[in-house]
């Protein structure tokens, strides 16, 4: 499915056998705009407080390198921002990083979080109709949450970070002679009290197809769930979800 970046090495024809081409190195890059909504709560303890968040458009950028060397996995890097903010009237008392907020207090929240995925994977199937990848994903989460009381200058800030190892899989199906296709991609983890998933599915349309370059439009839906139990004294049960559109360049 993916084009060669450096070209094809031609094998000499023997008798009536046709020439063949081997991919030396392939690469694809892409960018997505994600209209993301957020639900859930967080705290410095196991009892979480629910907050309200505004929908926001964030970005996801990725690049992948593929090669034909056996046993050595391919590499994909993904960088996703998941920033949001909101305004909440607290239903109950809330303590956060040393600051105590009473019930019925109006607070604003600024939530800045990014995810960096380092994915090592193998192509177990790759032809003109179907492509299947499986592998491992090291997802690095890095975030800062600021809670401010609206009627005072009291502010509490919490930073957290951690690497979460996850299983990874992707499947693509193309409809011949149309440029249309679908794909589903996901990373998963469920260990102890931690549960994290990152799933997306999309329709695709390749509007440029050549020996040197493919260009593909994407339109789909992505959902990221994060249930964390004591990462840097941070507890969370959050879901980031919404539609996205993207553009991919396949060399």
Image (cartoon, rainbow, N blue to C red):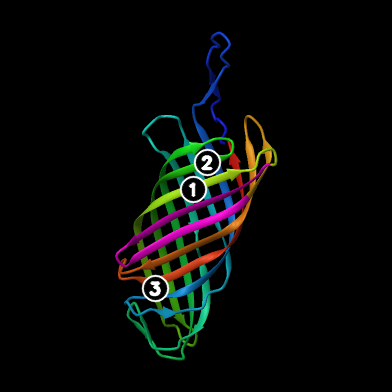
Q: Nearer the viewer, residue 120 or 85?
A: 120
Residue 87 vertical position relative to residue 22 in the rendered view, above or below = below
Q: Which residue is mark 1?
A: 170
Report the quarter where the C terminus lies. top right
- CA distance for labels 1 and 3: 37 Å
Q: How far from the left and from the top, in percent, is residue 173?
A: 58, 44
In this picture, which residue range is highlighted in magenta?
A: 179-203
Q: How far from the left and from the top, in percent, is residue 142?
A: 40, 61
Q: Are marks 2 and 1 in contact (CB under 8 Å)?
A: yes
Specify whether 83 is left or right of 140. right
Of pointers 2 and 1, the one earlier in the residue sequence:
2
Q: Which residue is mark 3?
A: 157
209 part of magenta stretch: no
Q: Secondary structure at mark 3?
A: strand
Report the quarter where the N terminus lies. top right
Specify whether 179 is left or right of 145. right
Residue at left offset 51%, top offset 47%: 171
Question: Residue 131 — which label?
Answer: 2
Q: How far from the left and from the top, in percent, is residue 121?
A: 42, 42
Of pointers 1 and 3, the one earlier in the residue sequence:
3
């Amino acid at each position: 499915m993916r084009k060669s970046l450096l070209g094809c090495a031609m094998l000499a024809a023997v008798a009536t056998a046709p020439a063949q081409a081997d991919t030396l190195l392939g690469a694809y890059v892409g960018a997505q705009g994600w209209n993301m909504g957020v639900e859930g709560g967080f705290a410095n303890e196991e009892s979480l407080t629910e907050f309200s968040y505004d929908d926001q458009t964030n970005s996801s950028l990725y690049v992948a390198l593929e090669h034909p060397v056996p046993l050595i996995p391919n590499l994909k890097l993904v960088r996703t921002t998941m920033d949001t903010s909101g305004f909440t009237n607290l239903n109950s008392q809330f303590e956060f990083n040393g600051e105590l907020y009473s019930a019925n207090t109006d607070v604003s929240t600024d939530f800045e979080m990014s995810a960096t995925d380092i994915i090592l994977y193998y192509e177990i199937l790759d032809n003109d109709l179907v492509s299947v990848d499986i592998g491992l994903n090291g997802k690095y989460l890095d975030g800062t949450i600021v809670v401010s009381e609206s009627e005072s200058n009291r502010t509490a800030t919490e930073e957290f970070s951690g690497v979460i190892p996850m299983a990874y899989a992707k499947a693509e199906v193309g409809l011949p002679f149309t440029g249309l296709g679908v794909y589903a991609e996901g990373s998963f983890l469920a260990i102890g009290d931690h549960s994290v998933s990152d799933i997306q599915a999309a329709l695709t349309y390749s509007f440029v197809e050549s020996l040197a370059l493919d260009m593909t439009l994407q339109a789909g839906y992505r959902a990221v769930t994060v249930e964390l139990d004591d990462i840097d004294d941070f507890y969370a049960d959050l879901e980031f979800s919404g539609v996205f559109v993207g553009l991919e360049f396949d060399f």
